[in-house]
Image (cartoon, rainbow, N blue to C red):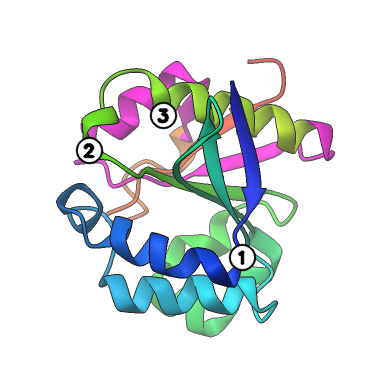
Amino acid sequence: MVTFRPVLSEDLPLLADWMARPHWREWWGDPQEELDKIRKKVEGRDTTRPFIFQIDGRDAGYIQVWFVKDQQDPEVAAVYPWISLLPMEAVGVDLSMADGSMLSRGYGTRVLQAFVEKLRREGHRRIIIDPDPANLRAVKAYRKAGFREMEDLLGRTGDSLLMEHWAGT
């Protein structure tokens, strides 16, 4: 069973440990910078909602939902110019497994499917994910979870592959 709980300040040391692991370092930024971003979210200085996901009652990874309309400012657009190409009503999702031994075993797909269901219940219809196209393991998991490449953006988003999950897929 997959469940989600909001990240609390007390979770930051746990996240710091996870972010220092090789499978995180490969695809996420500097651990301290990433942790500082999550701290801003926990403190309410960013509208992104961070969660710890649990599998069968055990903390198993991190997932967040961000709101496209809140990210379309010059500071974010300087790093991610493609953000202005996304629909304003869309939300984006990012996730990572806590432990590298859980990769390529279907957990990411299960977590993402459960999170999409949660977002749908909250009324979100356009859900985006933006893996690095070189992260083939993630792209495969996201496809299994019902995400598809945004054809009109292929080749226009640098080191991000924009994928969207449509209601009913």
Residue 160 screen position, x and y as percent: 34, 51
Q: What residue type is labelled 1?
A: Leu
Helix, strand or loop at disc 3? helix
Q: Which of 112 and 68 is in front in this view?
A: 112
Dots 2, 1 in contact, CB < 8 A: no
CA gap, disc 3 and disc 2: 11 Å
Dots 1, 3 in contact, CB < 8 A: no
Residue plotted at (28% across, 47% down)? 132
Q: Which residue is label 1 attached to? A: 8
Is residue 108 shown left or right of residue 22? right
Q: Which residue is label 2 attached to? A: 100
Helix, strand or loop at disc 2? helix
Q: Name the quadrant containing residue 137.
A: top left
Name which of mark 3 and mark 2 comes first in the sequence.
Answer: 2
- Quarter placement of the N terminus: top right
Q: Nearer the viewer, residue 136 or 61?
A: 61
Dots 3, 2 in contact, CB < 8 A: no
Residue 64 is a magenta residue: no
Helix, strand or loop at disc 1? loop
Q: What residue type is labelled 3?
A: Gly
Q: Which residue is label 3 attached to? A: 108
Q: Name the quadrant containing residue 18.
A: bottom left
143 in relation to 27, above or below: above
* Mark 2 residue crowding within 10 angstroms, few (<14) / some (14–19) / many (20+): few
- Visible residue check, residue 72: no
Name which of mark 2 and mark 1 comes first in the sequence.
Answer: 1
